[in-house]
Amino acid sequence: MSIPPEKILLRWMNFQLKKVGYKKTITNFSSKNIKDGEAYVHLLNVLALEHSNPSILAAKDPSQRAKLVLEHADRMGCKRYLTVKDIVEGSPNLTHFPA
């Protein structure tokens, strides 16, 4: 059985999100439910709660929330290849898998 990498990542992400009680299901990386950045906030909280910042979810503007998500990822020591624009527009960069 060959599952595309994007589908494997979606399954993993949804599994992690369910662990923290996130109610939405992410169906793809360009949908509205990923562009608002909330899923990324919850995912980062699962992965590194010690770097969590509750004010991220309080941000009403998706661009501001995306900026805070990327700052959270930086605090985790993750190399960043994405921009705020990539998140809020659902850029293909979010799921670029080398062939």
Image (cartoon, helix red, strand yellow):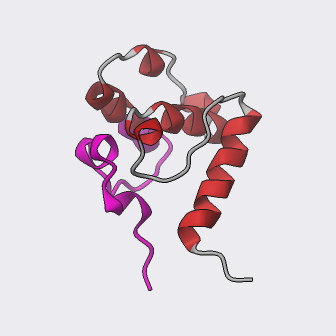
Task: Give the residue displayed 45% in from the left and 41% down from the top.
Answer: 34
Find residue 41 and report its horizontal and vertical position in percent.
51, 32
The residue at the far bottom in this view is 99
Q: Is residue 7 positioned above or below 90 on the image?
A: below
Q: Please name the residue shown 64% across and 65% down the image.
A: 8
Q: Quadrant of residue 16?
A: top right
Q: Position of residue 55 (x, y in %)?
A: 44, 15
Q: Position of residue 44 (x, y in %)?
A: 56, 38
How many numbered marks does the figure carry? 0
Q: Which residues are magenta?
A: 70-99
Q: Note whether 81 is above or below 47 in the view shown.
A: below
Q: Image quarter for residue 11?
A: bottom right
Q: Is residue 28 magenta?
A: no
Quadrant location of the N terminus in the rendered image: bottom right
Residue found farthest to the left: 85
Q: Quadrant of the C terminus?
A: bottom left
Q: Position of residue 93 (x, y in %)?
A: 33, 61
